[in-house]
Image: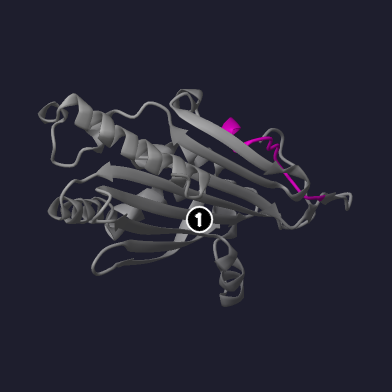
Amino acid sequence: MGEKLKLYGFNNLTKALSFNIYDVCYAKTAREQKDYIAYIDEQYNAERLTNILTTLTDMIGATVLNIARQDYEPQGASVTLLIAEDSMLPRSQTQLAHLDKSHVTVHTYPEYHPETCIATFRVDIDVATCGEITPLSTLDYLIGSFDSDIITMDYRVRGFTRDVNGKKLFLDHPVTSIQDYINPEILRRYDAVDINVYAASLFHTRMMIKEPDLQNYLFKTDIYELPPLTRLEIMNSLRREMIEIFNGRNIY
């Protein structure tokens, strides 16, 4: 962040990060697909998601004010955290109402289709902060918290604040690309593209795993149980699924 800016009053900039991951799996039978969904549902239940979000909140230097969480039937979970900067802990009902602009949410979406043998698990995390804190520093942690085959990220800074001389500031920290905030070792594992609108302080990055290990995508199946041709067919199916999700449209 560099030297702290001298502002007039509170920093009114709103920084919003939308972080979405997809985990893809091959489950041949209907039973395997249902078992995969149940496994994912247990692995990423509301309790574990709450732990991930509270750690994220601590990483950006914010404080949790309130937590709401819910597991769904038959599958999925949601967690919402109301957060604040340490210097802005609520001292009145009015101030607490103002702080509802700073929050962290997560929703999960397990999904499968019985005819394709492909199951997907999607996680959507949204972090909205007002003030000096920014969620970009948590990207390595978020990517590592999930089996992230495809990742889409949007970051936007809204509003403006003023320095002590009255000059408007529409961005209080330098941003060229979301990729700049991701560890190079992580980036090397992915193909990544950017779509950025600098005039609107709007930044978008998409990432797709480069070299997937087939064994990591087989649910309750050992790769050595499969003949080479079957392995190739499964790998092609997985790659097609990833490419379509990465591009956001049907291609094959």
The extreme bottom residue here reads 93
Residue 105 visible, this orientation: yes
Residue flagged by tag 1: what amino acid is it?
Asp
* Left or right of 20 on screen, residue 159: right
Q: x, y (%) of residue 29?
A: 15, 50
Q: x, y (%) of residue 131?
A: 65, 53
Helix, strand or loop for the magenta stretch, by majority: loop
Residue 100 placement: quadrant:
bottom right
> Magenta segment range?
169-182
Position of residue 183 relative to residue 219, above or below, is above
Q: x, y (%) of residue 240?
A: 39, 40
Q: Considering the image in quadrants, where does the C terminus appear?
A: top left
Q: Is residue 10 covered in magenta?
A: no
* Left or right of 89 on screen, residue 68: left
Q: x, y (%) of residue 128?
A: 56, 56
* Residue at the spot of label 1: 126
* Left or right of 181 on screen, residue 119: left
Q: Is residue 170 covered in magenta?
A: yes
